[in-house]
Structure formats: structure tokens, C-alpha cells
Amino acid sequence: MLTAMVGLLENARLWRAALAKRLTQLTALACLTVLAACSTPEVPEQVERPAGELYDEALDLAMDGNAKKAAPIFEEVERQHPYSDLAVRSQIMAAWAFYQDNDYPKAVASLDRFIELNPADPLVEYAYYLKALSYYEQIVDVERDAEMTLLALNAFDDLLRRFPEGTYSRDARLKADLARSHLAGKEMAVARFYAQNGHYTAAIRRFKKVVTDHETSNQVPEALYRLVESYLALGLVDEADRIGSVAVYNFPDSFWTQELLKLAEDPSRELPKGMFQRTIESVASLFDQE
């Protein structure tokens, strides 16, 4: 019996030790939980506010030149009041604020979303225009990277297809023509390089691309002139004559057409006699200075 009592006492001692250890662990865990709670920053509560109040605050910020702060508040109008009268207008205003802040990727993303959700809204024409501007204003050096120029051109063309006589059509056409000239200029630079190094076949492909893909650009008269030079360098007189006729007929007053006429008439260049003669005679009145 004494042995049994000793065993019970020993078990009790071990149980108390285990309990004390468990209590220590629970206390440490509780302390860690409190510390973690203290170290976690409080997330500010999103307070719902009237749509008009949010919109006016964002508009005031934008008008004061703080478009960066205005944009998320415009977005908040739609988030808190998706069915209000100001929700749609706030979408386009948020995109405009991103554009004003030069945050073009967010502006384009917001405009694409607006166009998708509101295809019949009166402001959708402006959304297309602002999207094109967002690309256009990122054009830095078309010689190094033509991607942004191409995106701008496609966006302006998209606007003009949908709204050919719209509010922004005139400016869109002007900027689209400039973008085409930029792209054509890049092609011309590459083509000139090929021609200068004697790679006339490659140069001809590039010059033709300017004429066919960028026919409204101001690079076309020179491209035609360079095509004539390249064909003559390869001995393709008939092709040169055909291109020369096109240039004289379509661009009679161009500097490059005048150069073509000099090229045809200058015997020192060893060109075939009578080259362009029929064309020159047929449009002689266009060059009559009297």
C-alpha cells in the first residue's frame, strides 16, 4: 500500500509539472497574439459617402491640378454607387485624371473598360479620342521603337471609322497623318540604308511599302524617286519609267518629282534616251510657268 501511495504522489508531481508547462505555453501564445495584433496596422474603414460629395471632391482636386489624388476618388464613386447617375461620368473622369497624371497604362485600361461597358454612351467618342491621345503622347523616337506610333495610328483610325464626322475627327486625321509620316519615315530610313549599301532589292521592297502602306504620308514622293534610282541601278529601265510616270502624274509640284525630271534629262547620268519623255509631254502644262 505504501508503494501504491508513493506511485500516486509521483504521478501527481508529474501531472502538476506537465500542467505548469502547458500553462506557460498558453501564456506565451497569448502574449504573441497580443503583440501581433499590436504590430498589424489598422485598415481604415471604407466609409460610404454620397455620390455627389465624392464626385465634387474629386473634381475639385482635378481642377486644382492634383489629378493623381482625384482619380481613385472618381473610381470610388462608381464603387460605392454603381447605379447612380454619376457612376458612368466618374468612369470617364477617372480615365481623364489618369491621363492628366501621365499614367497612360491606367488611362487606357480605364477607357477600354468604359467603352466596353458603355458602347452607346454620348461620351464614348471622347473615350476613343482620349485613348488615341494616350498612345500618341508616348511617341518618343520612332526610329528606335515604332510600336507606340502604330498603336496611336490604329487608335485614331478606330475613332475615325466609328465617328468619321465626329467632334474629334479633324484633329484625329491630322495626328493620324503625322503618325503615318513617322512610320513611313522609319521605313525610308531603313530603305535608304539598304540602297546606300548596294542592297537594291531590299531597298525596293521598303520603298514600295512606303508607297502602298503609307500612301497619304509626305514620304511618298521621295519613295517614288528612290524607287526609280534603285530600278535604274539594277538596269530595270521599264520599271523605272513606270514609277517615274506615276510620280510625275500624281506629284507634279513635288521637289522629288522635279529631281526625277532632272534625272531623266541629264545626259551625264547615262540614262536611256527619251526616258519619261511620253509622260513629260503628257503633263507638260502642269509645269508651265507662264
Image (cartoon, rainbow, N blue to C red):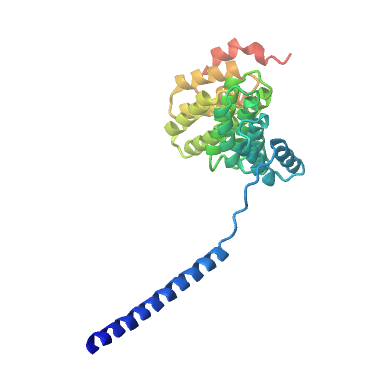
Q: Residue at x 52, y 25 (%)?
A: 211
Is residue 124 toward the left or the right of residue 9 in the image?
A: right
User: Where is the N terminus found, in terms of image quarters?
Assistant: bottom left
Q: Nearer the viewer, residue 218 or 132?
A: 132
Give the image quarter of residue 64. top right
Which of the two residues, 53 or 122, is positioned nearer the viewer here? Answer: 53
Residue located 49% across and 18% down the image: 242
**Count the marks: how many?**
0
Comparing 5 with 165, the one in front is 5
Q: Residue at x 28, y 82 (%)?
A: 8
Q: Position of residue 287 (x, y in %)?
A: 66, 16
Does residue 225 lie above or below 149 as drawn?
Answer: above
Q: Is residue 164 above or below residue 177?
A: above
Q: Nearer the viewer, residue 250 or 181?
A: 181
Looking at the figure, which quarter contains the C terminus? top right
Where residue 289 appears, x then y in whole percent? Answer: 72, 16
Q: Position of residue 162 (x, y in %)?
A: 58, 20
Q: Is residue 22 left or right of residue 114?
A: left
252 lies left or right of 195: right
Q: In the rendered image, is residue 253 in sight?
A: yes
Quarter where residue 130 is shown: top right
Q: Residue at x 54, y 63 (%)?
A: 37
Pick out the residue farthest to the bottom. Answer: 2
Residue 124 image offset from top left, x and y in percent: 62, 26
Q: Quadrant of residue 220?
A: top right
Left or right for 286, reference 227 = right
Residue 255 in sight from this viewpoint: no
Q: Residue furthest front?
A: 1
